[in-house]
Amino acid sequence: MERRFLVDDIDRTTMEGVEEVRFGLEGVEFRIDLSEVHIKELREMLLPFMRAARREGGPSRIPDGLRAVLGDAVPPRTAGPAGGNVGARRKRNADEIREIRAFAEKHHIHIGPGRLPRDVVGACKANDPNLVDPKRRRPA
């Protein structure tokens, strides 16, 4: 039976212990095949950033190799597209919802029932109706 090995994408060496590593930056996912040495280097370089960051999406259980590097400093998980919830939405209380809808009505901004559009929420918080997408505007 033929054994298959992956090639380390950094130094092009072929050996046992090369694994695919996935990581993301600014919404872009990357995959790279790395030897154990290069995996350790990557994790150590990213360690200060991972410790300061908030996790978004991904598996609920951190892989053992990454947990070994992070130790007790595992970043908390936030809601994200891969985490089941969409975006960083939070539940708004009834007063906030009424305030946003009143702002929209006062400034002739169309919003339907259900979720409040982000641009309308942002415009209400900034008290600037010009921040709303012009397509939402209704004639006065």
Image (tube, rainbow, N blue to C red):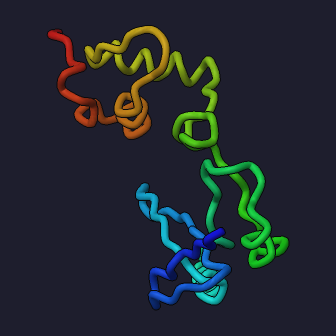
Exactly how many numbered labels are in the figure? 0
In this view, 45 is above or below 29: below
- Asked if residue 48 can be seen in this view, the reply is no
In this view, 128 is above or below 139: below
- 139 lies left or right of 80: left
Question: Front-most of 11 and 21?
Answer: 11
Residue 90 x %, y %: 61, 34
Q: Quadrant of the C terminus?
A: top left
- Asked if residue 116 can be seen in this view, the reply is yes
In this view, 120 is above or below 115: below
Residue 66 found in image quarter: bottom right
Q: Residue furthest left?
A: 139
Residue 124 x %, y %: 40, 31
Task: Identify which residue is drawn at 63% across, 35% down.
Answer: 84
Residue 131 x %, y %: 27, 36
- 61 lies left or right of 38: right
Q: Quadrant of the N terminus?
A: bottom right
Residue 56 x %, y %: 60, 52
In this view, 119 is above or below 10: above
Residue 38 found in image quarter: bottom right
Question: Front-most of 13 and 114?
Answer: 13
